Image (cartoon, rainbow, N blue to C red):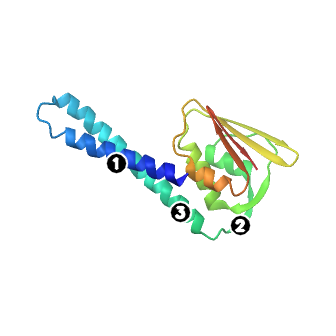
Amino acid sequence: MERRLVHTIKNKLGAIKFASSVLNNKNIPSHKKDIIINNLKEAANEAIELFEIFSEIDKFKKSTLNKEKIYIVSLLQKLTNVNLNCEDKAIFFDKIWLEKAFNNILTQIKEYKIMLSFKDNQLKIIFLFCNEPIYIDLAKEIFSKIGIIKEDKGKIEIIL
C-alpha cells in the first residue's frame, strides 16, 4: 500500500517537473500555457493530498488508540447528514481515527449511495458510487484493524 502511494507521489512530482520545463518553451501559445498551469496546480494539489494521506497512515501506525464505544450507524449519519435506517452496532475503537477513515472515503467519492445491513452481529456498509476513489489507503489501513474492507469497481464494502 505504501509503495503504491510513494510511486504515485513520484509520478505526480515527475509530471510537475516535466510540465514546468515545458512552460519555458517560448513557442507555446498562451492558451496552452494556461492549460499546462492548471494541470500543474491539479497535480500539485494531488501530490499534497497524497503526502497528507501518507503522513496520516504513518501517524496511525505509531499512535496509541484511545478505544471507546462507538455506534457506527450513528457516526455515519453524523458524517453524511443522511438518515440511515439500520440497526446500529457498537464497536470499541478510536473515534478520531474511525472518523478519518470514513472521511477518507467520503471525500473521494461523489454522488454515493450507502447501503447497510445487520446480520449475525455483523454490520455491512456498502458505498455505491459513480467515480472511482483514488486514494482510500488511509481507510483501508484503519478498517483492516477492525474488520474487512473490499474495494471493487463502483463499490466499497466494509464489514464490521
What number is the disc on residue 4? none
Residue shown at the point (44%, 49%) measured from the top left: 7
As helix, strand or loop, the secondary structure at mark 2 comes to strand
In terms of sequence position, does the residue under pointer 1 or pointer 3 come before the other? 1
* Residue depicted at x 79% and y 41%: 86
Nearer to us in this view, 9 or 37: 9
Residue on which the image places disc 1: 13
Query: What is the x, y in percent for residue 54?
Result: 49, 56
Three-letter amino acid code at disc 2? Lys
Determine crowd level at label 3: few under 14, some 14-19, many 20+ residues with C-alpha closer than 10 A. few
Distance of mark 1 from mark 2, alpha carbons? Answer: 38 Å
Q: Which mark is residue 58?
A: 3
**Location of mark 2 (residue):** 67
Task: Of the two numbered discs 3 and 2 on the same chain, state the one appearing first in sequence.
Answer: 3
User: Is tag 1's residue or tag 2's residue first in the polypeptide sequence?
Assistant: 1
Residue sitting at 62 percent across and 43 percent down?
80
